[in-house]
Image: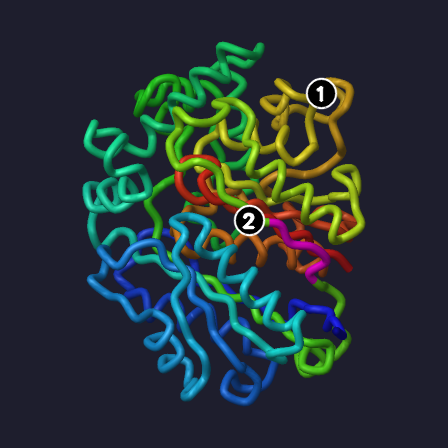
Amino acid sequence: MTVTKPYVAAVGTSAFGRTDLTGRDLFSAAVAEAFEDGPDPADVVDALYVGNQSESYEHQIMHGTLLAEWCGLRHVSAERVEGCAAAGALALRHAVEDVRSGRRDAVLACGVEKMTAGGTAGATNALSAAFDRALEQRSGVTAPSQYALLAQRYLHDTDATERDLARIAVKNHANGAANPRAQFQRETDVETVLDSDYVAPPLKLFDCAPVTDGAAVVLVASEAVARRFGTGDPTVRVGGVGAGANNIGVADRDLTFVEGAHEAATDAYDEAGVVPADIDVAEVHDAFTSCEAMLAEAAGFAPRGRGYESALPPAERSDGWTDTHLSTSGGLKARGHPIGATGIAQAVEVYEQLTGTATPDRQVDGATTGLLINEGGVADAVTVAHVLTT
């Protein structure tokens, strides 16, 4: 079977944050940005996948049909993809596979979430649906409390401290300050992070990603379609994809090594023909600062037990670290975390880094290869990794 190389033809996002706009409005802004310098969506898009975590925020299902209609697509395949916070990357994976197989020439991978419609309580309740109903939900656990269990064990088993986690928040806020679409466009310092209240020890308020509204889209296309966008010379392609599921319950897996992310990243590397040291930029699922530390290890960027050094200058890190730049967008921590849109937003950031179109203060010079890791459930229930390369 002939394999079609899947290119990233166009990308777009809304601004991330708290807004009065609806999910459809946010999606419309992302589509308008993606197709600003290209043909109309109806002229090229064969199918549409929408990553969306929960219908409870806006009391809305049928996101595939709804958003296809909103951008002028009729009679195309359109469906919602669910995987909690991995929904966006799952939508992207479906788009890549459609194009790679030759079944479609251009597929729009989307993500959208209007989290503030339900308030903090609504978001907390919706996110708890990702836990095992019989064994976890009924005990009253929340996403922060589940991740705090992992963070507690990580601090116990390594030399990491709360101050080390705070440095990760500071780094990502600095990156967010250079991202005009980030929810938090301001820097912070270690003492401010450490002085913030505990949400679930050892995680403090500034260790946690915020409740966010936002949308993002990526058009995955064959080379012929991709040439109709931008300069007409597509440069970024999806070189590898990996995905897998682990046990949904936190008690049934390793608490400090994200096995599913390691397997997904390794599969993506193998498919792309790269190794961790080849990755110039990586967007990892830092829903909490401890996540960035553990994912740096799972992706092979840091030695086991040393991922917490991600915010240190390279010269101060332990031997065995790669030169990979992590969370240049500000990550989930500062860019924001509109659940279903996060995986797509990660791809947008990597695309901008590889095309040299990120804002100057966050642009990584000479970046040619990037990784995105998007997780659903608590840490490792579903993990999807993509390698983008030029």
Name the residue furthest front. Answer: 1
Query: Is 240 inside the magenta-drawn segment?
Result: yes
| Image quarter of residue 276 | top right
**Which mark is drawn over residue 317?**
1
**Which mark is drawn over residue 384?**
2
The mark closer to the camera, 2 or 1, is: 2
Dot 1 falls on a residue whose secondary structure is: loop
Q: Amino acid at mark 2?
A: Val
Task: Report x, y in % for residue 112.
Answer: 39, 61
Dot 2 falls on a residue whose secondary structure is: strand
| Image quarter of residue 197 | top left
**Residue at point 46% right, 50% down?**
86
Left or right: where does residue 389 sit relative to residue 334? Answer: right
Number of residue marks? 2
Q: Nearer the viewer, residue 339 or 377?
A: 377
Q: Nearer the viewer, residue 334 or 96?
A: 96
Q: Which residues are magenta?
A: 238-242
- Examine the residues drawn in magenta and state their main secondary structure: strand
Task: Report x, y in % for residue 251.
Answer: 39, 24
- Visible in this render: residue 177? no
**Residue at point 60% right, 48% down?**
385
Location of the C terminus (image quadrant):
bottom right
Question: On screen, 41 above or below 347?
Answer: below
Query: Is 168 inside the magenta-drawn segment?
Result: no
